[in-house]
């Protein structure tokens, strides 16, 4: 049975995808994540000293979370178990914990439990782990693509160290692809492959930092490649000319006739484009990618960067974001961050919202782009927003200001008897349309302070004129009283 199991494992390993076969076996082979795996960094020190605590690996797919867990498994003396939360049950978790207790009591060895897609466990399932993680019976390594601060129980998270994985750079992806092409034991080094630089660069770009996707595309493209050798009746010179015309020989690739003679596999840009097809955009409409992209979108418009704002708009639309949601965000920004510095921004936002609602994608992307550029290039002021936020805080937290009697409603019987409206000064009866001695609030408070940007500088001048008129009226009243 042992021989059969070894043969079975060897067969599975031999037929595993390239990304699995090329999985790093040492820390030095792990690509990227230098911010916590570089020399002297925290996680590397923990692994090399065999002093692991429970860990949470958080990041997008293909960035090395599972890979690093397997590297850790081969580093220390601890037993290693792996489960996938999508298929594992509480019973499976309890079975591993029971084995861990037995091993710890009998041999003094600890157990590392790696749970992939930990966010798929519900709260009750996560709670099963809590006591044994706290007591050190198991060292938990959980991998998740979801924000652990929302997806994982707070008690479990507080007993773990979170490491955030970043997408691999294009240079790191290219290096992984080149390693796979040269590795004869685990990679494709036993095949006569000639891969062009632009083909590898294309995979690195389109994979968007996902090493698994790039390696899979490389293997699919190479193993499915079928090159056209020169027909037997075709003269060698003609075949050579045809090969040069087809390949261009721009990257040192063999001509068609040479490929036919030596059987080399050319993995060029066309093959790379065919193998990976459309770019995979990492975007979850309800998760971190959604909130992070929206945050960048809003802050780019607020920061007057139309290029960045249009990019984030395009990224979200390409990923399938609801355009009406984006139109709402534009409308909010028009009041919150532009306000009266450019009152027309609100009209542009309202029109964009209406048109987006009426015509939808793909045409509404033009309207949204126009509105985004307008918002990004408009003068900015949050003075109106600050005014209502401050007033709202006063309404909620301070004593309520009663409506002055002069401003109260007079359109009912008995209002005059109560003195409502008595002494009210009709603004249009006064010069400039402003009644200089009318009090509209009953307390001294300034909520709206216009900026000197855009149209608000004219508003500021007008309000200054109103204040001066009221001050003059007040001085005039004081003189009258003194006489």
Image (cartoon, rainbow, N blue to C red):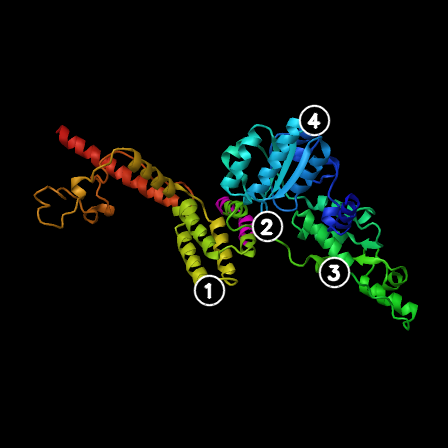
Majority secondary structure of magenta residues: helix
**Callout 1 secondary element:** helix
Q: Distance of mark 2 from mark 3, alpha carbons?
A: 24 Å
User: Which comes sooner in the sequence, label 2 or label 1?
Assistant: 2
Q: Residue 114 occupies which quadrant of the picture?
A: top right
In this view, the residue farthest toward the bottom is: 233
Q: Quadrant of the C terminus?
A: top left
Mark 2–mark 1 CB contact (< 8 Å): no
Q: Nearer the viewer, mark 2 or mark 1?
A: 2
User: Which comes sooner in the sequence, label 4 or label 1?
Assistant: 4
Question: What label does residue 49 carry, if any?
Answer: 4
> Which residue is denoted by mark 3 in the rendering?
270
Q: Distance of mark 3 from mark 1, alpha carbons?
A: 37 Å
User: Which comes sooner in the sequence, label 2 or label 3?
Assistant: 3
Label 4 environment density (alpha carbons within 10 Å; few <14, some 14–19, many ≥20):
few
Label 3 environment density (alpha carbons within 10 Å; few <14, some 14–19, many ≥20):
few
Q: Distance of mark 4 from mark 1, alpha carbons?
A: 61 Å
53 w.r.t. 221: above or below: above
User: Which comes sooner in the sequence, label 2 or label 4?
Assistant: 4
**Residue drawn at 50 percent across, 35 percent down:** 154
Q: Distance of mark 2 from mark 4, alpha carbons?
A: 35 Å
Question: What label does residue 382 carry, if any?
Answer: none
> Is 106 one of the magenta-colored residues?
no
**Callout 3 secondary element:** helix
Mark 2–mark 3 CB contact (< 8 Å): no
Q: Is residue 477 left or right of residue 210?
A: left
Label 2 environment density (alpha carbons within 10 Å; few <14, some 14–19, many ≥20):
some
**Residue 318 in the image: x percent, y percent?**
56, 56
462 w.r.t. 477: above or below: below
**Residue 69 in the image: x percent, y percent?**
67, 38
Q: Is residue 268 visible?
A: no
User: Which comes sooner in the sequence, label 3 or label 1?
Assistant: 3
């Amino acid at each position: 049975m042992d021989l059969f199991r070894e043969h079975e494992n060897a067969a599975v390993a031999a037929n595993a995808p390239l990304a699995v076969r090329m999985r790093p076996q040492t820390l030095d082979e792990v690509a990227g994540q230098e911010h916590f795996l570089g020399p002297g960094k925290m996680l590397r020190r923990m692994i090399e000293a065999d002093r692991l605590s429970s860990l949470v690996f958080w990041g997008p797919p293909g960035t090395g979370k599972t890979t690093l867990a397997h590297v850790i498994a081969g580093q220390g003396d601890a037993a290693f178990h792996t489960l996938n939360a999508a298929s594992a049950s509480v019973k499976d978790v309890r079975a591993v914990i029971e084995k861990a207790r037995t091993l710890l009591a009998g041999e003094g060895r600890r157990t590392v439990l790696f749970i992939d897609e930990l966010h798929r466990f519900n709260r009750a399932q996560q709670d099963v782990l809590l006591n044994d993680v706290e007591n050190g019976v198991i060292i938990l390594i959980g991998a998740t693509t979801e924000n652990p601060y929302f997806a994982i129980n707070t008690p479990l998270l507080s007993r773990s160290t979170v490491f955030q994985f970043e997408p691999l750079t294009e240079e790191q992806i290219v290096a992984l692809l080149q390693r796979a092409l040269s590795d004869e034991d685990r990679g494709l080094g036993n095949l006569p492959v000639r891969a062009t630089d632009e083909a590898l660069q294309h995979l690195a770009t389109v994979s968007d930092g996902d090493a698994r996707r790039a390696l899979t595309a490389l293997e699919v493209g190479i193993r499915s490649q079928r090159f056209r050798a020169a027909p037997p009746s075709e003269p060698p010179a003609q075949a050579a000319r045809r090969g040069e015309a087809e390949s261009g020989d721009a990257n040192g690739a063999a001509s068609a006739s040479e490929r036919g003679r030596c059987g080399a596999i050319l993995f060029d840009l066309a093959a790379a484009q065919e193998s990976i097809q459309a770019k995979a955009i990492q975007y979850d409409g309800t998760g971190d990618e959604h909130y992070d992209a929206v945050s960048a979108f809003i802050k780019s418009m607020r920061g007057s960067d139309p290029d960045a704002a249009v990019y984030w708009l395009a990224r979200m639309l390409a990923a399938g974001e609801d355009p009406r949601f984006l139109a709402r965000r534009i409308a909010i920004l028009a009041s919150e961050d532009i306000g009266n510095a450019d009152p027309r921004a609100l009209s542009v936002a309202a029109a964009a919202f209406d048109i987006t609602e009426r015509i939808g994608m793909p045409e509404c992307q033009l309207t949204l782009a126009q509105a985004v550029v307008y918002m990004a290039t408009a003068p900015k002021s949050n003075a109106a927003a600050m005014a209502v936020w401050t007033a709202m805080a006063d309404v909620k937290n301070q004593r309520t200001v009663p409506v002055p009697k002069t401003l109260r409603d007079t359109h009912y019987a008995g209002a005059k008897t109560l003195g409502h409206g008595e002494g009210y000064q009709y603004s249009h009866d006064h010069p400039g349309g402003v009644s200089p001695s009318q009090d509209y609030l009953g307390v001294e408070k300034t909520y709206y302070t216009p900026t000197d940007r855009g149209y608000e500088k004219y508003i500021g001048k007008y309000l200054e004129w109103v204040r001066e008129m009221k001050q003059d009226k007040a001085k005039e009243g004081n003189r009258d009283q003194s006489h």
